[in-house]
Image (tube, helix red, strand yellow):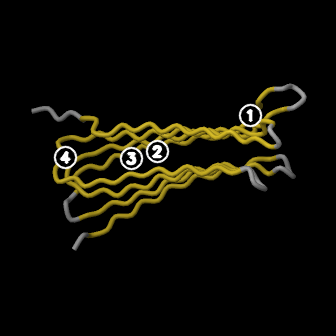
Amino acid sequence: MENTKKKNLNVVIEVKATDYQNGKLKNVFGGKAQITKADTDRVSQNDEDAITFRASDCGTPKMEVDYRSTSIGQGETETTVEIDLKGQTFDMNKSELIDAIASSSKLTKADAGRALDKKIEDYFTLKAEKSCEAECANVESYYTTKTSEIK
């Protein structure tokens, strides 16, 4: 009997925030995140996935996305998380939005032969920040995984 991966979760989240000052367009923040999980005859699964978007142009414009996952189960599973961030500023001289900062990141994780007495926690973050004074951008991304025994 052939094992084929079955998609058991596909979530797409898109957010957009428009900032006006004194009735005039100033900034547009946007983000897209997609989670896809597929497994092969996984049993006794108990998964929790969460994505949080944050964006602010107060002081230093920045955008941040956090992905957190907790998983307990037996069998093979593959998780893909894709994140895209984009911040635009309205150029008064040209009367158009220009790209101020953009960033994307992708995580693909495959777990095979997992046991029911283990819990796996994953943390994945993408952060983009623009310094108004220095007119430069900073992007950070990190991933952490933790496996612990369930008693």
Neighbour tally class for label 2: few under 14, some 14-19, many 20 plus, Cα within 10 Å = few
What is the CA distance from the residue labelled 4 to the residue labelled 3? 16 Å
Neighbour tally class for label 1: few under 14, some 14-19, many 20 plus, Cα within 10 Å = some
| Mark positioned earlier in the residue sequence (4 or 2) | 4
Q: What amino acid type is highlighted by mark number 4? A: Arg
**Residue occupying image coordinates x 17% and y 42%:** 41
**Residue occupying image coordinates x 77% and y 36%:** 25
Tell me the quadrant of the picture where the N terminus can be found. top left
Q: Position of residue 114 (x, y in %)?
A: 23, 55
As helix, strand or loop, the secondary structure at mark 2 comes to strand
Which residue is more in the foreground, 67 or 136?
67
In this figure, which residue is indicated by the disc labeled 4?
42
Q: Position of residue 18 (x, y in %)?
A: 68, 39
Neighbour tally class for label 4: few under 14, some 14-19, many 20 plus, Cα within 10 Å = some
As helix, strand or loop, the secondary structure at mark 1 comes to strand
Q: What amino acid type is highlighted by mark number 1? A: Asp
